[in-house]
Image (cartoon, grey):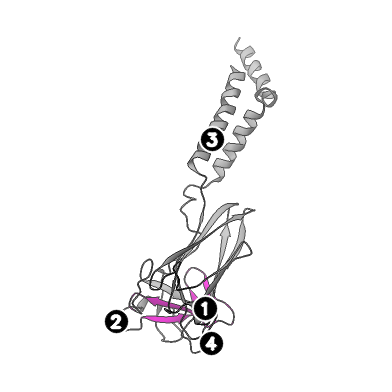
């Protein structure tokens, strides 16, 4: 009798796909989808040192200030760097990445005590600058680019040769510009800029770029708290998918009974 029961189960498993129908296939597919979503994917920032708070002993080009000594009186409170920890590098032909601190002007960083200005005070003959970082997406899916912006000069860009304007891009998936001051981007305040986008393939690498635009006079837009995070499915969608998967598993169990 025991051998007969084993044979019956084997037969049912052999024909399980036709007996359970689309429910089993759906359950298996949903399991694969859920397993592919890494724990904490909704909060993990794919941008390294997006708040510019990681510092080291590298030296600036203008004030010869070590990055980890900024805002330590009586030393310099800002300087311009060719690169920053985390993989940030200045774009070719740009003046460098200016790091300011909470003691540079009457504006505190959005997070921590460091932020970036991309119309840099440089001794290289030009001030408009840019910075890039390569970002790798292990999984395809929907993501959100977020950063915080503040205009330095309190003059509307349409009357000041766009001195505060900054362009940004992520490969070809995201492109845009931001400027101020305006009702949307007030002076001496931080405003969040967001862009949602889709990555089609696993293990995709894209270049994140910020670039100062307009008049070069060492006064421009500020950037802080840069992040790229996965956009989670809404709770209702997870409940719906889980319910569908459960139906498939129940149907299979019924066939095996």
106 relative to 49, above or below: below
Question: What secondary structure is marked by label 4?
Answer: loop
Residue 9 % position (x, y): 63, 19
**Which residue has dot 3 on it?**
240
168 relative to 71, above or below: above
Which label lies toward us, 4 or 1? 1
Q: CA distance from mark 2 to mark 1?
A: 38 Å
Q: CA distance from mark 4 to mark 1?
A: 22 Å
**Which residue has dot 2 on it?**
73
The image quadrant that residue 27 belongs to is: top right
Name the residue nearer the viewer: 230 or 39: 230
Question: Mark 1 and mark 4 in contact (Cβ < 8 Å)?
Answer: no
Residue 13 % position (x, y): 65, 23
N-terminal of the two: label 1 or label 3?
Answer: 1
- Which segment did they paint magenta? 74-103
Name the residue nearer the viewer: 217 or 63: 217
């Amino acid at each position: 009798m025991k051998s007969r029961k084993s044979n019956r189960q084997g037969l049912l498993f052999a024909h399980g796909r036709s007996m359970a129908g689309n429910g089993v296939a759906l359950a298996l597919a949903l399991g694969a989808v859920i397993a592919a979503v890494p724990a904490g994917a909704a909060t993990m920032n794919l941008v390294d040192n997006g708040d510019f708070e990681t510092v080291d002993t590298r030296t600036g080009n203008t004030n010869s200030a070590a990055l980890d000594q900024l805002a330590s009186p009586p030393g310099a409170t800002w300087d311009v760097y060719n690169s920053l920890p985390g993989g940030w590098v200045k774009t070719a032909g740009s003046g460098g990445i200016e790091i300011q601190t909470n003691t540079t002007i009457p504006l505190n960083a959005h997070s921590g005590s460091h932020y970036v200005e991309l119309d840099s005070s440089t001794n290289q003959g030009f001030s408009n600058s840019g910075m890039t970082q390569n970002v790798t997406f292990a999984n395809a899916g929907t993501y959100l680019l977020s950063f915080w912006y503040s205009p330095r000069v309190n003059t509307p860009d349409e009357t000041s040769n766009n001195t505060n304007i900054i362009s940004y891009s992520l490969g070809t998936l995201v492109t845009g510009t931001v400027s101020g001051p305006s009702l949307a981007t007030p002076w001496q305040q931080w405003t969040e800029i967001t862009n949602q986008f889709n990555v089609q393939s696993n293990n995709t690498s894209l270049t994140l770029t910020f670039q100062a635009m307009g008049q070069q006079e060492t006064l421009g837009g500020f950037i802080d708290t840069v992040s790229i995070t996965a956009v989670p499915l809404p709770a209702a969608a997870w409940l719906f998918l889980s319910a569908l998967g459960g139906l498939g598993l129940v149907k299979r169990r019924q066939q095996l009974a």
